[in-house]
Amino acid sequence: MPVYEYECNECQKVFEVQQKMADAPLSECPECKGEVKKLISSTSFQLKGGGWYADGYASTNGKLSDSKPSSDKAPACASGGGCAGCPATAS
């Protein structure tokens, strides 16, 4: 069940409430009964596991790709060599 964060306009208390997505938003503070507003907060969502890569591309040697581009070597498609060296064409 999602956790929603609210702030009271009267007492400035910030609190969290577990609610179903279909539930109506809260309208009053549980402590002072003042009007509350729903806050937008950052989530702790992270992609983990072997299927996620640092740069979005799989390497051809089976290991995770390095997220830092090589500065001494231009990509094959940028140097007129076609897309043979492009990570997007690796299968």
Image (tube, helix red, strand yellow):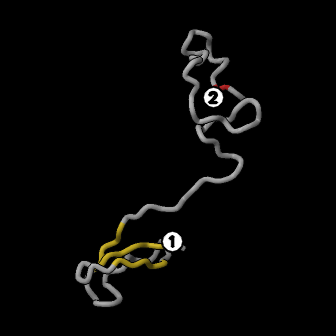
Seen at 30% across and 73% down, the residue is 37
Which mark, residue 88?
2
Task: Name the spot of residue 17 as percent of width and height, x first.
Answer: 45, 79
User: Which residue in the protein does label 1 denote?
Assistant: 2
Dot 2 crowding, Cα within 10 Å, few <14, some 14–19, many 20+:
few
In the displayed structure, would residue 35 be above or below residue 73?
Answer: below
Asked if marks 1 and 2 touch (Cβ < 8 Å), the reply is no
> Between disc 1 and disc 2, whose residue precedes?
1
Task: Name the spot of residue 61 as percent of width and height, x first.
Answer: 76, 31
In the displayed structure, would residue 49 be above or below residue 33?
Answer: above
Task: Name the spot of residue 13 as percent of width and height, x first.
Answer: 32, 80
The quarter of the rendered structure image containing the N terminus is bottom right
Relative side of 4 to 46, left or right: left
The front one of 57 and 1 is 57
Three-letter amino acid code at the position of disc 1? Pro
Three-letter amino acid code at the position of disc 2? Ala
Seen at 63% across and 35% down, the residue is 66
Seen at 63% across and 23% down, the residue is 86
Dot 1 crowding, Cα within 10 Å, few <14, some 14–19, many 20+:
few
Relative side of 23 to 28, left or right: right
In the displayed structure, would residue 90 be above or below residue 54?
Answer: above
Secondary structure of residue under mark 2: helix
Task: Name the spot of residue 4 as percent of width and height, x first.
Answer: 43, 72
Residue placed furthest toward the top: 80
The quarter of the rendered structure image containing the C terminus is top right
